[in-house]
Structures are given as structure tokens and as C-alpha cells.
Amino acid sequence: MTKNYQLETHKDRLILKTSSFKAEKTSVLHSGVYTREFTSMLFASGACIFSYMLTDIISSRPPVIRYAILILLFVAAFLGANKYIFKERQLEAVFNRKDKMIHIVRSGLITRKIEKIPFEKVKSIDIGSRKFVPDNFDGINFVQKISAQHGSAVPGLSDVEEFVTLSLRLIDGSEKIIFADKIDGGKKDGEPDIPVREIRSFLDINGPVR
């Protein structure tokens, strides 16, 4: 089974890294079509079209030079968008036994969001689940019928999505999801690959954090 996370141990620190930390309904845009690369290409194409329209008005350079500049702009915009704008978001949870703190770092577009949680504020480390069931099947069927007639069916609109989650349960009743694994097709053979045992073992706990 492929792991959607990485675990690293360094003396008094256990580091969890993952891009699977959101238990939410996925977009109706088919991920097989609207990939990071395709979206970056659309962004770069838009930037080139805008630049061409602008230079067509104010530039007197020969067409060959302008086209060469547009090609370079497309490559730069594509690489930049793919790396910075449409990059895959990451979560890093660092469990530090030395200072008894949990550092949760979420990557953003430009900056990173860092959250610090003391061990004493964590009640338990729990495995849970979340399920998303469509609530308007008539509307979904209508959209799918219209899309099919135009040769552009939208997959996934009526799918039930379920996630297995790993959360830090805090003493104030709130929770912080640090890992979420989607159950494809509503079923997953065997025990879900959730790093709960490693984390509990590192913190030397079986239930609540003390």
C-alpha cells in the first residue's frame, strides 16, 4: 500500500510530512484533466495572450523578436505557476519531546502558517472518519445529462466520498487534523495506513497525552 506521508525520527523529534491533510469534498473539476500542469499551462497561455495584446499596441519590434519573447514568457510563467501558484500544499507536524511542543506547519502561496500546541493541551490522538454525501441528486443527474449531450461528462458529481482522519483532540473539544486518507470507492482493503501507532509510540502513550 502506497503511503501518503513521510515519517522522520531525529532524537527527540518525530516529523510527519504529508500533502493529504484535508478531509473535504473534492472539486467537480476532474483531477485527471485539470492537473497542476494543465492549469499552469492555461495560466501561462493567458499571460502570453495579455502580453501579446499589450505589445501589439505599444511595441514596434519585429514579429520574430516578439514571438521569441512570448515563448520565453510562456516557459517562465508555466514553470513559476507550477512551482509557486499551483503547487501541492504540504503539512508538517513536528512532535518535540524536548520542549513538549507540537509544531504544525502548513505551506501557503507565499508564506507558511505555523501553529504551536503544547503537549498538555492535547487530550488524545484519534482516528476518525468523515463522509460527504451529495444532497441534490436531481440536480446532479440533470447536469450530467446536459454534459453528456455535449460530450463533456463531469465525473464524480454523485460519488460518496469518505476519509479516514488522524487528529489531535484538544482539551477544549476542538481537533486538528494532521492526516486524511481518502477511501477510494468507499472501501479500503485491510487496515488503513495511518501513522497513529508511530506517533503514540514516540510520545509513549496509548490514549490521551499526559
Image: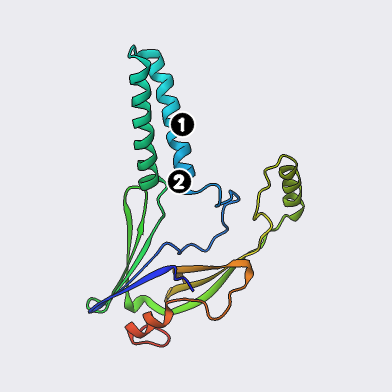
The quadrant of the image that shows the C terminus is: bottom left
Instruction: Give amino acid for label 2.
Output: Glu
Image coordinates of residue 169 in percent, x first then y, are 44, 75
What crowding class fits label 2: few (fewer than 14 Cα within 10 Å), some (14-19), or many (20 or more)? Answer: some
Instruction: Give amino acid for label 1.
Output: Gly
Nearer-the-camera pick, 122 or 82: 82
- Distance from disc 2 to disc 1, alpha carbons, whole Å, reads 14 Å
Image coordinates of residue 89 in percent, x first then y, are 40, 56
Nearer-the-camera pick, 82 or 137: 82
Determine whether 169 is above or below 32 in the image: below
SS at mark 1 in the image: helix
Determine whether 52 is above or below 152 in the image: above
Q: Residue at x 75, y 41 (%)?
A: 149
Q: Is residue 158 left or right of residue 165?
A: right
Q: Which residue is mark 2?
A: 37
Q: Residue at x 42, y 31 (%)?
A: 47
Q: Which residue is mark 1?
A: 46
Determine whether 65 is above or below 157 in the image: above
Image coordinates of residue 138 in percent, x first then y, are 77, 52
Nearer-the-camera pick, 186 or 200: 186
Disc 2 vs disc 1: Cβ atoms closer than 8 Å? no
Q: Is residue 20 left or right of residue 119?
A: right
What crowding class fits label 1: few (fewer than 14 Cα within 10 Å), some (14-19), or many (20 or more)? Answer: some
SS at mark 2 in the image: helix
Foreground disc of the pair 2, 1: 2
Image coordinates of residue 59 in percent, x first then y, are 34, 14
